[in-house]
Image (cartoon, grey):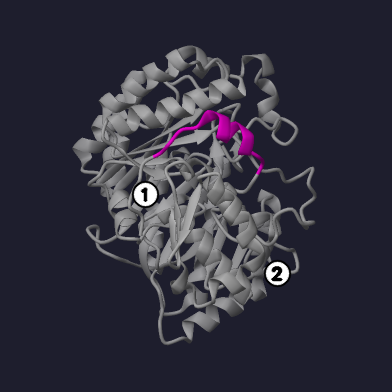
Amino acid sequence: MNTNPGVEFDPELIARMSQQGPRYTSYPTADRFTEGFGANDYAQAVRRLAGSATRRPLSLYIHIPFCESLCYYCACNKIITTNHDKAVKYLEYLKRELDMQAALFGDWRNVEQLHFGGGTPTYLTDAQMGDLMDFLRSRFDFASDADGEYSIEIDPRTVSPERIRSLRRQGFNRLSLGVQDFDPDVQAAVNRIQPESMTLDAIGAAREAGFRSISIDLIYGLPLQTVDTMRATLEKVVSAAPDRISIYNYAHMPQLFKSQRLIKDEDLPSPAVKLELLGLCIERLTAAGYVYIGMDHFARPDDELALAQTTGQLHRNFQGYSTHAETEMVACGVSAISSVGNIYSQNEKSLERYYGHLDRGELPVIRGIALDADDEVRRQVIQRLMCDFALDEKALGVEFDAYFGTELDKLRQFEQDGLLALKDGALQITARGRLLIRNVCMVFDKYFGKAREVPLQRMRYSRTI
């Protein structure tokens, strides 16, 4: 269980230890999925779980890939188009996939969590979203509004206050707003012009509509950002008082993402300034009363995310941190990744090939992985470290020192660096080590540094800090 020891910011240590590494939204990481895993493997995994004595509730993820305009920094799977007729066709095929998933799960359809991501989910019209939500309810059994967590990512540029009220009526109770930065020059440099008033109006409408939680997304390391501009943005964010704040590190990889080539290298803050920006974010938000959940998330002390970390029930998945650990995640839509039992599966990334699978009556799964017993032990270790910043070695079901004999040498080195403490059958991340948690997790990753199916020139990690 995490005791929230705070953060010790050591720029020299961070600069020395920062390297490219996974974000561990899954273990094994997505670049370890293989194309030898297909729809039949996924279906067999679901049937095995459906026949078991214990069925966990479901968490549904729905991917809406469309955006009307291009944000230069974005590395998400998206389709830029102003032709909204494309959404009509996509929804037709998405419903086919949902029908196939519902049939596969049979009478096991209890949903406790729903998340719409993208792209821009609010690219859909109000009528299209209402129809899709009705369709989902006709195929799955949703927990009550009080018990379920139903969230959607919105672009404030695409919604009105009335649209936000409609989203609440349609069943969403959590809202995440993309902001990235309030500074007009930074917004222009990344092609995302979003007046402050537009964001504040959206937050106000969400509060009036009764959303249970409101989250803001920011990015540090964007072009033209300085300590002064970031300080001004943080003051506005604190004044807006969202329940949760996510602050992501901008990973500039123009060799992989064409849109990032539109960002001028000379406009990017230096590595030293990026560290200053991160330090400022942590300092200002914790001073304002937010709990630093870890990695890139902050939450008010009474928010369910902070409470889940306190009780050891925090979970990390492809959407970041979550309060619903005991669920099977079923992801639908182009490129979506599911996590069911001991398998991960990913849908086709190409829209036309996604349609082709469904036209043939096939789930659009194109790759994945089935975890062996060792993968599951290591997944548990990495999950707990990412969420709790601590590990009870006795809870793993293995003799820790013997099982991780090779890893212990590296862990003891980290202990000498002050990143962690090994004592009495427990591993505790220190305040000095919290910002380098990905480095610690990499010690337990048996795949890291080994050859992968996805070539290195196509799959690159961001820096750990």
The residue lying toward the viewer, choosing from 284 and 263, is: 284
Vertical order, 226 against 62 (above or below): above
Instruction: State the residue at coordinates (64%, 58%).
Output: 409
Vertical order, 200 against 144 (above or below): above
Q: CA distance from mark 1 to mark 2?
A: 30 Å
Residue 362, visible in the rendered structure: no
Q: Quadrant of residue 441?
A: bottom right
Q: Quadrant of the C terminus?
A: top right
Residue 238 forms part of the magenta stretch = no
Vertical order, 107 against 249 (above or below): below
Instruction: Name the element at disc 1.
Output: strand
Vertical order, 258 against 211 (above or below): above
Instruction: State the residue at coordinates (53%, 27%).
Output: 275
Q: Quadrant of residue 387?
A: bottom left
Disc 1 + disc 2, Cβ < 8 Å = no
Q: Residue 302's spot in the image, x, y percent?
A: 22, 47
Judged left or right of residue 339, residue 197 is left
Which amino acid type is shown beneath numbered disc 1? Ser
Instruction: State the residue at coordinates (26%, 37%).
Output: 206
Lower sequence index among marks 1 and 2: 2
Which amino acid type is shown beneath numbered disc 2? Phe
What label does residue 31 carry, if any? none
Judged left or right of residue 170, residue 185 is right
Q: Quadrant of residue 194?
A: top left
Q: Residue 114's spot in the image, x, y percent?
A: 39, 57
10 Å neighbourhood of mark 1: few (<14), some, or many (≥20)? many
Instruction: Name the element at disc 2.
Output: loop
Q: Which residues fall within the magenta stretch?
A: 7-20
Residue 9 forms part of the magenta stretch = yes
Q: Residue 225's spot in the image, x, y percent?
A: 51, 17
What label does residue 151 carry, if any? 1
What label does residue 37 carry, if any? 2
